[in-house]
Image: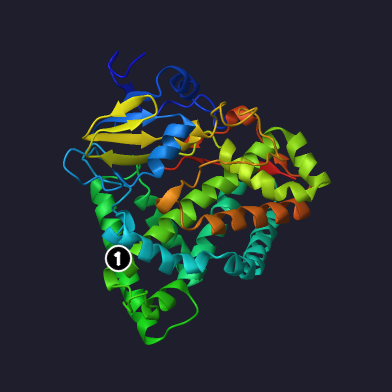
Amino acid sequence: MSVDDAAPLSYPFPWQSALEPPAEFAELREGCPHARIAVGGGEMTLLTRYADVRTVTGDPRFSRDLSAEGAVGLNADGTDLYSQSESKSMASAGEAHEQWRRMVSRWFTAKRMTALRPEIEQMAEELIDAMVERGAPADLSALLAFPLPIRVICSMLGVPDEDKDRFAHWSNVMMNFSRFSKEETAASTAEFDAYMLGHIEAKRREPADDIISNLIVQTDAAGHRMAGADLLETAKALLAAGYETTANSIGKMTAFLLADRSRWEALLADPSLIRTTVEEALRFDAQLGLGLPRFISEDVKVGDAVVPAGTTVMLSMAAANRDTTVFERADEMVLDRSPNPHISFGVGPHSCVGQALARTEMAVVLEVMLRRLPELELAVPVEELQLDDGLIVTALTALPVRW
C-alpha cells in the first residue's frame, strides 16, 4: 500500500478497547508506515514506525509551529492546539529554545525530584485517606490520579491550593480537541492569562521558593532574564504538560496492573519492580492521544520514503512504542523490561522537560497504593472501561476500584 492508494484514513482511529491499541497501528507499521490521514483542518501523514518517529522528533527541520503557511491545524477551524501555549523560544529550534530549556530544566533535576518526593507522598496519602473514608467502590481517576498532579504543579508554580480546580479546568481547555468550542477556548485562555499575569506580578513583589519566583530573578548565560510573556507561556506549558498527561498516565498504569491482577501481585511480592513498571506502563499505553504534529518545509527522506515539503506529519508514539522490531514481546506488559527505550516523552531537544516529575509522581503513587491498598482491584469488568477522546491526550473516563 502507498500513501496515494486510497482516500485518507479518518483519524484518530476508533478505539475498540480502552487498554488496547487500534488494529490500524500494527497494520500501518507493516504495510503503510507513511499513511495519509484526515484530521482536524486537513490531511497529515501519520508515522507509526519507531525508527521514523524517533528520527523526526530529533530533526530540527521538522517544526512544531503549525501556524506556518501550508501547515495543518488539529481543529477544523485551524487552531494550533500544540503551539498555542508556547512562546517562540519554546517552540523554535536553536539557541533560544536551548536557553529556555536550560533555565526551566533546573527545576526538574534528580536532586529536586528527590526533595519533592516527601511532599508528593504526603499528598497521595491524604487523597487515599479521603478515598477510603468515602468507601468502595470509588473512582480512582477522579479521587487520586487527577487530583494529585494538579496539586503538585500548583505547588511548584506557587499557586494557592484552593485554586487547583480552576487550574484543572484551564488545563483541560488547553488540551482540547473536541470538547470545547473555539469561543470557550478563547474565554478560558483569557481567564488563565489574566490570573497568571497577576500571579507573576505578585511574585515579583513577594517572591517565594517556586518556579515563577525563581524564573523572575534567574538570568541566562548572557545575563538576560525571562520576559513576562515567556513567564506566562512557561506557566501555561508546565500546567498543560504537568497535569493532564501525568494524570492520564497514573490512571492507565493502575488499570494495566489491575486488568491482569497477576501484575499487581508481582509488585506486591517485589516492590523493586516499581521503577521498571513505571517505564513499561509509559511504553505500554496504547492510547497516548493524538500524537505529535510536525511541519516540514523541504523534502526530507524518512525511512524508505521522502516526506515532501509542505507536509504536516503526525507522530504516533503509541504505535512506535509497540514496534516489534525494537521491543521483544511488544504487545505484552513486561514489568522488568530493561532496557526500555520507549519514546513516550519524545526525544531530542523538544523532549518533555517535565518527564522526571511525571516519573516521580507515578512511582510515588504506585508505592503508596501498594502499601495502603494491597487488595485493590477493578470494580467493573475491564471491557467496561472507556476513554475520553475529547482532549489531545486520551484518559479513562473513570477507573472504578474496590479494596
- Give the side of residue 126 with respect to residue 204, left or right: right
Q: Quadrant of the C terminus?
A: top right
Q: Is residue 85 left or right of residue 243?
A: left
Horizontal side of 227 relative to 121 (left or right) equals left
Residue 224's place in the image compared with 385, above or below, is below
The percent coordinates of residue 271 (x first, y second) are 78, 50
Amino acid, disc 1 = Asp
State which quadrant residue 325 falls in: top right
Whether residue 203 is visible? yes
- Residue annotated with mark 1: 193
**Image point (54%, 53%), residue name:** 146
- Estimate the x, y position of residue 321 in percent, counting from the top left: 53, 34
CA neighbours of label 1 inside 10 A, class few (<14), some (14 to 19), many (20+): some
Q: Residue furthest left?
A: 69
Count the marks: 1
Picture residue at 64% right of the left edge, 67% below the top: 114
Asked if one can make out residue 399 in the rendered structure from this viewpoint, the answer is no
